[in-house]
């Protein structure tokens, strides 16, 4: 472990994740760029960008790591009732940019967001390459909830979610976990621990365990470039 972060030039490789700071937990490096190549290199090494607009790019790999195993997703009694109503239409990859913009909107007392113009542009590039995906909940023709993330091999990296209607993002996540389980995905990276994610079945594991699982999963063949869900959560 190091006591200071590494500053990246355009071609500087990432340091080993074991060198990330303990405080703030997981801060590993700063600088570089948000090119497709840099982002894919980061995700394959268990590293992700998270920084405010106007700041240098910050790269993170926290320990422990919050993950959700697809078949461990918890469907509460109330969520099961919502699933049975079928009031949401679930689509994939039909409104990726709109999902990112909705996730970027300030919430509660927030005045800013880490999902800013540079991040949106970078992940749209990944989406056009079939690497970044969105899962969307629609109601009466309106986008009311959803999530987006990165898929490499049989690993999914969750980035953010939003809801404009109660349970909309949870329903999207329920469909995602059901389909990922069917496709043989082993893990969803949730990055940081939150009570909301824990209530849905996510849990912390040591970074060392995360990295071992990650290296196995990213070596698997990729799924279709444009997703189409064929499996639904059991209601």
Image (spheres, helix red, strand yellow):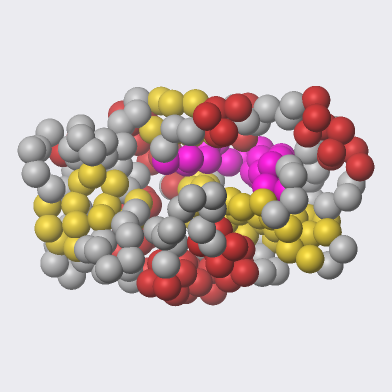
Name the quadrant of the C terminus. top right
Residue 95 magenta: no
* Residue at left offset 57%, top offset 33%: 196
In the displayed structure, would residue 213 be above or below residue 96? above
x and y, in percent, of residue 169 in the image: 67, 47
Residue 114 position by quadrant: bottom left
Q: Quadrant of residue 99?
A: bottom right
Q: Is 114 drawn above or below residue 170 in the view shown? A: below
**As drawn, which residue projects farthest toward the left?**
3
Residue at 43% over, 58% down: 111
Q: Is residue 56 left or right of residue 208?
A: left
Q: Is residue 78 above or below residue 215?
A: above
Is residue 144 in view?
yes
Q: How far across and how far down the image is residue 125, in percent?
A: 47, 73
Depth check, front residue: 191 or 165: 165
Query: Start and end of the magenta stretch?
Result: 168-191
The answer to whether 227 is drawn above or below residue 129 in the figure is above
Q: Residue at x 91, y 42 (%)?
A: 85
Out of 209 and 90, give the one closest to the viewer. Answer: 90
Report how many numbered discs are placed on residues in the image. Answer: 0
Q: Quadrant of the N terminus?
A: top left
**Residue 30: image location, x then y, percent:** 19, 57
Q: Residue furthest front?
A: 109
Residue situated furthest right in the rendering = 85
Give the residue drawn at x 38%, y 41%: 215
- The x and y percentages for residue 130 are 55, 67
- Left/right placement of residue 7 relative to residue 79 reads left
Helix, strand or loop: magenta stretch: helix
Q: Is residue 185 magenta?
A: yes
Q: Is residue 220 visible?
A: no
Left or right: 110 in relation to 45: right
């Amino acid at each position: 472990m190091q006591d200071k972060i590494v500053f990246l030039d355009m071609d500087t490789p990432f340091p080993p994740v074991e060198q990330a700071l303990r405080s703030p937990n997981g801060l590993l490096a700063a600088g570089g760029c948000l090119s497709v190549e840099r982002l894919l290199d980061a995700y394959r090494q268990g590293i992700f960008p998270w920084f405010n607009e106007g700041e240098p790019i910050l790269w993170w790999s926290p320990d422990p790591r919050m993950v959700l195993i697809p078949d461990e997703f918890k469907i509460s009694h109330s969520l099961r009732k919502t699933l049975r109503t079928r009031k949401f239409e679930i689509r994939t990859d039909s409104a990726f940019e709109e999902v990112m913009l909705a996730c970027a909107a300030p919430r509660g007392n927030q005045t800013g967001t880490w999902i800013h113009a540079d991040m949106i542009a970078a992940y749209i590039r990944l989406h056009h390459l079939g690497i970044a995906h969105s899962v969307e909940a629609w109601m009466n023709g309106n986008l009311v909830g959803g999530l987006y993330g990165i898929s490499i091999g049989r690993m999914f990296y969750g980035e953010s979610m939003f809801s404009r209607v109660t349970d909309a993002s949870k329903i999207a996540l329920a469909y995602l976990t059901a389909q990922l389980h069917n496709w043989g995905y082993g893990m969803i990276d949730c990055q940081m621990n939150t009570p909301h994610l824990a209530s849905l079945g996510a849990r912390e594991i040591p970074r060392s365990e995360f990295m071992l699982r990650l290296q196995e999963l990213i070596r698997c063949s990729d799924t279709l470039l444009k997703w189409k869900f064929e499996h639904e959560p059991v209601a």
